[in-house]
Image (cartoon, grey):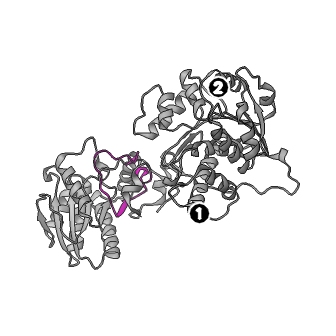
Amino acid sequence: MIASKLYPASVIKEIDRQYSEDYGISGFQLMKLAARRVVEVILARYRDTKRAQIFCGSGNNAGDGLLIAAGLADRGWVVQVALVGDVEKFSEDARQALLVCQNSQAVFEPFEGLVMSGAILVDALLGLGIRGEIRPRYRSAMMAMNAANNPVVAVDLPSGLQPDSGEVDAVCIMASITVTFLALKIGLYSQDGPDYAGEVILADLGLPGAVLTAQDAKALRVLDAPTLRARKKTAHKGHFGHLLVIGGNTGFGGACLLASEAALRSGAGLVSVVSRAGHRSGFLARCPEVMFRAATDTADITDLLDRVQAVVLGPGLGQDQWAQNLYRQVMAAGKPLVLDADALNLLAQSPIPLGDCIITPHPLEAARLLGRDKVEPDRLAVLRQLRAQYGSVVVLKGAATLVLSDTGIAINLSGGPAMATAGMGDVLSGVVGALLAQGQPLNRAAELGVAHHGRAGLMATSQQGEVGLLARDVVTQVGRSLAGMPL
């Protein structure tokens, strides 16, 4: 399930608190509502199994698990509770749940590495409670659950999955289904999340809409991919902007070519390219619609910069004298700008605040821009740090690309692993640049470009398959996506 917004763990906890305080719902009542919904899911999906093993930790997630155990046992299931956590650390709500479970037909067994044969496994170990390194006893239980190949239902969040980043450290529960509560967590859809969460089912527990609305400003918007406005019958190429793509140093003409083709497929009226002279014949053969200009190490392109509406700088650019000469001219021109690839590496060498600019780093480029060897797993923090230092619209690429602008943070959930191949970033820069040239504001160009790039990737994957997809396969689908063609 995908909603229009995703929420960080801190906001989920605030939503929980507000719901309890403002609407008189106790923590134990919320536990009962949560457990009842998980039991309903298990009965609907695994009705004929009638065997369950419930793995419980020490936090409130354990309380949910104990009530799930009681609910299944009351319906005639054979239920075994494996207490992995320390009962002495239970909250008052979890202690109430323990009493309910002890009064049911569920059987308590110390966990000694054995998983019930043919049982549904319920992960109520950590949930949102993951902090630091996972303790050995929990790790052993998680590894045993994963090794058993039984269906696993995770309670709120697969244990081991970071709720905000979607990162996994040493071990994480591989769930068949995750029943998550109140609102959707970012980690379920970011980085490793989709590989571990399985099918995600939202149980809102009767949460009033007003509580969510009050937290909207702290949520991540999930990007949609609306179509561009229909063109007038009298339209001509001058109405749709002139984009300049600069890159393609010796041996890297393909990057610049992909960006240029993507820009044309994204509706730019005119596309000019500045590249090395040796790439001219390749451009003429592959994409004659592009206006090609060869540049030397000292070329002056200010006349061309004056004529265009936007610039993409970076695909295949390099960092030599030729690249630095073009970089300096573009940065001085003040045009709406997309910086990608080696343009970002040149920026990292001499960081400056940016004006009308969109930067599109992948994690390693982001680390360089922040003066580090690598970035921290918290991608939201990295995004905000880049924005604070450079002042631009930031597109942080990766699984579930993030976009930060004046309108907040948005997350893209379209695309997929088929797009993990060379040239995809060049295609994205061309799409975003074309939208800028057509007059889209910076934030809208970035968001639309990311969303349609991902959607075009899905369209190409449906035709080519997941293995062996090429960046140019996506280029051919970009126009169809922007026009609203079905997947």
Q: Is residue 166 or residue 278 the one in the foreground?
A: 278
- Is 65 placed above or below 41 here? above
SS class, disc 2:
helix
Residue 449 seen in this snapshot: yes
In which quadrant will I find the C terminus?
A: bottom right
Q: Residue at x 70, y 43 (%)?
A: 260
Q: Is residue 291 left or right of residue 365?
A: right
Q: Is residue 39 magenta?
A: no
Q: Callout 1: 10 Å neighbours few (<14), some, many (20+)?
A: few
Q: Residue at x 18, y 68 (%)?
A: 116
Amino acid bearing label 1: Gln
Query: Gap between marks 1 and 2, in whole Å?
Result: 37 Å
Q: Which mark is residue 463?
A: 1
Q: Residue at x 38, y 61 (%)?
A: 198
Magenta part of the protein: which range?
A: 163-189
Q: Quadrant of residue 23?
A: bottom left
Q: Is residue 208 left or right of residue 423?
A: left
Residue 416 seen in this snapshot: no
Q: Is residue 167 magenta?
A: yes
Amino acid bearing label 2: Ala
Which residue in the structure is indicated by mark 2?
Answer: 323
Q: Is residue 38 or residue 49 the one in the foreground?
A: 49
- Is 202 placed above or below 76 here? above
Q: Quadrant of residue 108?
A: bottom left
